[in-house]
Amino acid sequence: MITEETIKKETLELWQQHFSDAKRELLYDGDFCSFLKSAEDSAEAEARIHLQPWLHILEDCIQWLTNLWVILKEELRADNAPSTLVSVVSLVGASCAHAVAVRRMVLSGLDTPARETLRALDEYLCVCIVLLKDPKLAIKFQTNPHEEAEKFFFKNFKTELLKKHLNAVERSIGLEPKITQEMREWRSKTIKLFSEAIHPCFLGSILTECPPTAKNAELHAIGILGQASAASEETLNFACKSIWYFTSLGFFLIFNDHDNNPPLIVMDKENKLHQHAVVGRRVIQTMNTRYWDYEIY
């Protein structure tokens, strides 16, 4: 088994050998990981001070999503579990992992990579809502061959189609047209902005290399190893609102009748996990609404 110490020793010997062959003084930090850890710790300390309330709200959102995944996973073990549940469990679980990744990268001062992951988080949650609304599509989703997955996604969930699906869900559960219109406009604008993080561009590269600091948004600092960034306010805000959106639509479709479909899970008021899901949903919705227009900078 290769241990950290053995691989460090092996690589150090190679660095020494090649510098020696070139008749040059060794220029190598064998403990560079400690330097990385220091940069990460510094970024996290700054983020926890300057990126509230959104950082804490996201952590509560992750707790709620994790609890929901446990509920779904337990239901999946039942003998009469709906066949659509497999797709829903996988998507909620993947959403948990992506939400945790967004949090960790923001805390590490890596905002652009966090935004890339956030786009995936948003898609996982939205696709999950669509599959909850359409059990037949949920079955096709889980039986789709790996090599056909990309075609299946673009056939059913590319941006414009996903919007139509979500609009239909919003109407079916009775959200007010004014709310859905505002949410739609906000989502379109934000998704477009965040999609820019996926493809390299000059301005995006510059702002990743030297982001505005969380301590002072008017100052920029080197961020190649991580720098708590004022840009993460928008990242965390969108992450929280994406999960808030799922608490509104996804929760309803899981625990209520809709389109002649029975609830995916029957609510048990005595079940502590179910209690957490109900109360946590209300807390997340209240906190997001309370700070909806709050701006840190």
Image (cartoon, helix red, strand yellow):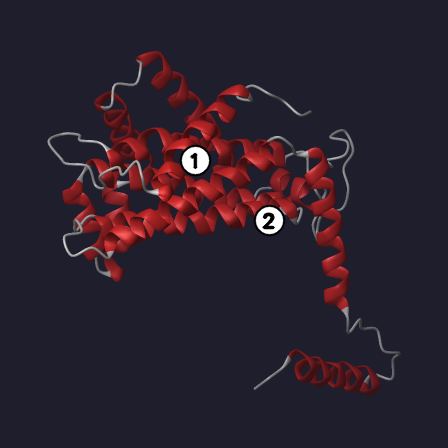
How far apart marks 2 and 1 lie (CA) works out to: 18 Å
| Label 1 environment density (alpha carbons within 10 Å; few <14, some 14–19, many ≥20) | many
Label 2 or label 1, whichever comes before in sequence order: 2
Residue 210 shown left or right of residue 237 in the figure: right
Can you identify the residue that label 2 sits on?
Answer: 105
Classify 89 as above or below 18.
above
Q: Is residue 49 left or right of residue 114?
A: right
Q: At label 2, which amino acid type do we have?
A: Met
Which residue is most to the top?
Answer: 178
Between 197 and 65, which is closer to the camera in this rendering? 65
Q: Where is residue 139 in the image (x, y as percent from the top left)?
A: 17, 50
164 left or right of 215 in image: left
In terms of depth relative to the viewer, which is nearer, 7 or 220?
7
Whether residue 235 sits left or right of residue 125 in the image: it is right
Q: At 45% across and 52% down in the image, what residue appears? A: 97
Q: Name the residue under label 1.
A: 243
Q: What element carries label 2?
A: helix
Do we see residue 211 in this rendering? Answer: no
Instruction: Label 1: state its secondary structure.
Output: helix
